[in-house]
Amino acid sequence: MLKKRIIPCLDVKNGRVVKGTNFVDIRDAGDPVDLAKHYDKAGADELVFLDITASHEKRDTMIEVVRQTARDVYIPFTVGGGIKSIDDMRAILRAGADKVSINTPAILNKELITKGAEIFGSQCIVVAIDAKAKGDGSYEAYINGGRVNTGIDVFSWAKEVEKLGAGEILLTSMDRDGTKDGYDLELTRQVSELVGIPVIASGGVGSLEHLYEGLVKGKASAALAASIFHYGTYSVAEAKRFLIDKGVKVRW
């Protein structure tokens, strides 16, 4: 069995790491390169950089931040936000990222998933799905930084994403984002059971128990978190020790 991964998420806005609640109420959390270096030394398995306004404002992802991070950070990292074409993917990967994450462009241009996988390999293509519960047990996918409801069923979309060639899914519960109430375990479990590619659980971590629940009850391959690490509530080492003590196989 593959070991579970712990992935700090760095939401970037105007060159700074920020954190919000339900995709709004943003507050500053530090310099992205400094934080990336910190997590590299702290034992994180991977990192995710998300330019949270790039798709909405039609801005390109900050290449220079990627270059600086690649020079000083040795763990794999994914970059998302504003990646709309194969050329954008190529630029991000050449700057030093290991993977690219796409959400809005993946839905608007499904061929981008397939072409990206063919050119760079499926392992480089992460499709982010921002999911919001409808109240009847179903979920809809949102784009443009959570501003636009596509009406697309999340479960159907997750299966299609895998068929199109994505190597991983970054699954965020918009309802839980920043709330510290824990992952949406039903959402995470259903998507994890539907697909054969790794699923990263995202949205709502407030305690170490939540990480455990996402990985075990939610059956995710990796647990993504932001606030609990950025503001020093817990360290990556504390999280891994907690999971090991609970019988979860993680990289130490």
Image: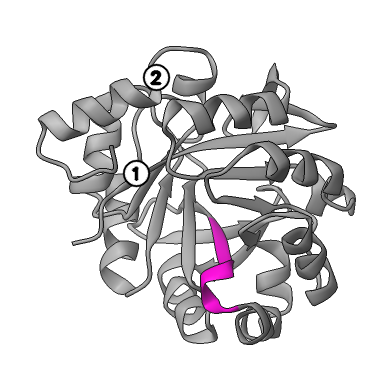
Out of 77 and 205, give the one closest to the viewer: 77
Q: Which residues are magenta?
A: 121-129
**Colour option used:** one colour
Q: Which residue is mark 2?
A: 235
Viewer can see residue 104:
yes
Which mark is first along the chain, 1 or 2? 1
Name the residue type under label 1: Asp
**Mark 1: secondary structure:** loop
Q: Is residue 89 magenta?
A: no
Name the residue type under label 2: Ser
Q: Position of residue 162 (x, y in %)?
A: 46, 78
Give above or below for 3 relative to 93: above
Closer to us: mark 2 or mark 1? 2
The image's mark for residue 41 is: none
Q: Is residue 173 left or right of residue 58?
A: left
Q: Which residue is mark 1?
A: 184
**Mark 2: secondary structure:** loop
Q: Position of residue 165 (x, y in %)?
A: 52, 82
Out of 143 and 65, give the one closest to the viewer: 65
Q: Quadrant of residue 205?
A: top left
Q: Quadrant of residue 28?
A: top right
Q: Position of residue 190 (x, y in %)?
A: 28, 62
Out of 169 and 78, give the one closest to the viewer: 78
